[in-house]
Image (cartoon, rainbow, N blue to C red):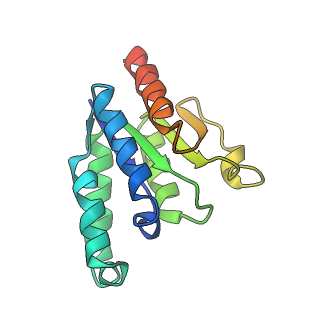
Amino acid sequence: MIVHFVAPTPQFEKNQASYQKIIDAIIASGYEPSSEFSQRVPTEIEMGLSMLDQEDWETICRRELARIDACDALIADATNKSTFGVGYEVAIALAQEKPVLLLLRDGSMGGSFISGLMHPLLTRQQFNDAAIKRVVRDFCLTIRKEK
């Protein structure tokens, strides 16, 4: 099974270590991460975010939607409350009836739209760096039981 991980591009450099822990936890749970993500993080950091602004966003959108089509579940860093792209990707995955784990750093969930979202396939979980592997592993075990 393929688990696709999405995160807001401006957060890549700041959260690279956490994102690598998420990828590692997906693999340790016996799932295949979107290999493109684990390769993309360091590449986009090396390129600098200004170069991303020059990339064809239509191509990026098509590529991300194809990855969602191909995955069995989606994990999203939804810590940043104004991440339209991540929210759209979550909505697409839910519309395709795929389980979704919304990750929110400890203390970031209160008083936001995210805190009110309800869907039978949506799991919201607060995390910190010490707990991220357990949180992802527990989600992967849950989706394994559902399949």
Q: Is residue 72 visible?
A: no
The quarter holding residue 63 reads bottom left
Residue at the (36%, 78%) spot, across then down? 49
Observer-nearest residue: 15 or 100? 15
118 sits to left or right of 122: right
Residue 93 percent location from the top left of the image: 42, 43
Pick the quarter of the image with the N terminus. Answer: top left
Residue lying at the far top of the rendered structure: 145
The quarter holding residue 123 reads top right
The quarter holding residue 127 reads top right
Residue at the (69%, 49%) spot, across then down? 109
Residue at the (28%, 53%) spot, across then down? 37
Q: Is residue 138 visible?
A: yes
Residue 60 percent location from the top left of the image: 29, 67
Residue at the (60%, 35%) spot, across then down? 119
Observer-nearest residue: 1 or 61? 1
Residue 78 percent location from the top left of the image: 55, 53
41 sits to left or right of 105: left
User: On screen, 118 above or below 141?
Assistant: below
